[in-house]
Image (cartoon, rainbow, N blue to C red):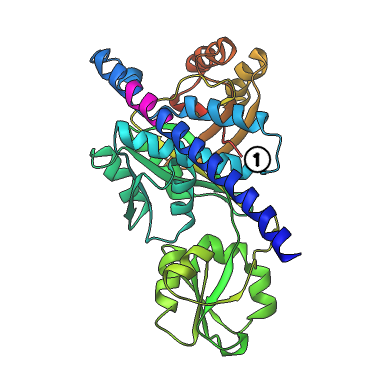
Amino acid sequence: MNDILQQELSGMRRQIDAIDAQLLDLLSQRARCAQEVGAIKQRHFVPGEERTRHIYRPEREAQVLCRLRDMNRGPLPDESVIFVFREIMSACLLLEEPLAVTFLGPPGTFSESAAVKQFGHAARLVSCASIDDVFREVEAGHAAYAIAPLENSTEGAVGRTLDLLLQTPLRICGEVVVRVHQNLLSRAADLQSVARVYSHAQSLAQCHEWLNRMLPRAKRVAVSSNALAAQMAASEPDAAAIASEAAGERYDLPRLCASIEDEPNNTTRFAVLGHHDAGVSGKDKTSLIMSAPNLSGSLYKLLRPFANAGVTMSRLESRPARQGLWEYVYYVDVEGHRDDPAVAGALEALAKQAAYLKILGSYPAAVY
């Protein structure tokens, strides 16, 4: 029986080895095509034409991933197919032009996970101490793209990102959605030994009810990121951190409790920021900031162009303008690309009504 088993396994392993050789050959062919694409772009680059000079094309990547997801018949799940091909594209992109991408650090944050999910492991990821620095490094030309947290499904918008979007010359050229599993990490032997819990303010809020039940006496300390919380808790035997599994692995911090978030479908949406818009992918969003004159019915007048054009609004968020007492700006996401006729018409009509209008960018919707 063992001889028969070994023969069958050997036969299957030979098939796998042969398929691996074919895959390697096909990957090399794809990489050579990617190099040729880069060479063509360089030969036909016209100064001043922004979309022709950028190697990274988020709309093209989104189209490829959506097509492959729709073609997938298993047994690999769609998520695995997308992950594998994202890494292939990342490695091929590196042959054209190395990309530096900033994220809110230190390493081990959900922002780093979002950067890897969007750009793959071949990109050069640059850890920043604050969201301000994430923007600043790209604005100064020290990195090509930034990953910035926009909103969480439980706790809402990230205020500092919204404030910076109002000021920055950068454009939104993509979005990433990351499923957030919060873990309690600690060197403490049990929950009763935990005196302090470090984490980002949003993560503390996302786990508020769990903390009330399980650690009612522990002091909650907000810090600038979850990874920093893990770094701090790693050196204090009676402290814990709420952070990702990756942060625990990076700082050698055991997981005391897993998935402690109050909402089971907790997700965070991140913006990809660069110096250019994305082209039309076929499933796009457009983000903008607008303000209304301080008159009766002015917000209704701002929203009416979208309704008249049949454009779906997926997000409307108000925030103090910081320029006058009780004055507000509105952050809006609509479905469609700014080059789509319906969206273009709505934006043209909106420009005539708004006291202030800034188009943040058009970009492909996140691919799951």
Q: Is residue 97 visible?
A: yes
Residue 64 x/y as whole percent: 54, 27
Residue placed most toward the observer, 156 or 149: 149
Residue 285 x/y as whole percent: 55, 27
Image quarter (top left, top right, bottom left or bottom right) of the C terminus: top right
Mark 1: amino acid: Asp
Q: Is residue 176 visible?
A: no
Residue at 52% x, 35% y: name it.
Answer: 331
Q: Is residue 152 magenta?
A: no
Image quarter (top left, top right, bottom left or bottom right) of the N terminus: bottom right
Q: Secondary structure at mark 1?
A: helix
Residue at 58% x, 20% y: name it.
Answer: 282
Q: Which residue is mark 1?
A: 78
**Badge 1: how crowded within 10 Å, few (<14), some, or many (20+)?**
some
The range drawn in magenta is 30-36
Please, which residue is most extreme toward the right here?
1
Q: Is residue 291 above or below residue 150?
A: above
Residue 338 x/y as whole percent: 50, 18
Tell me the chief SS of the magenta region: helix
Residue 104 x/y as whole percent: 39, 54
Q: Is residue 149 above or below residue 98?
A: below
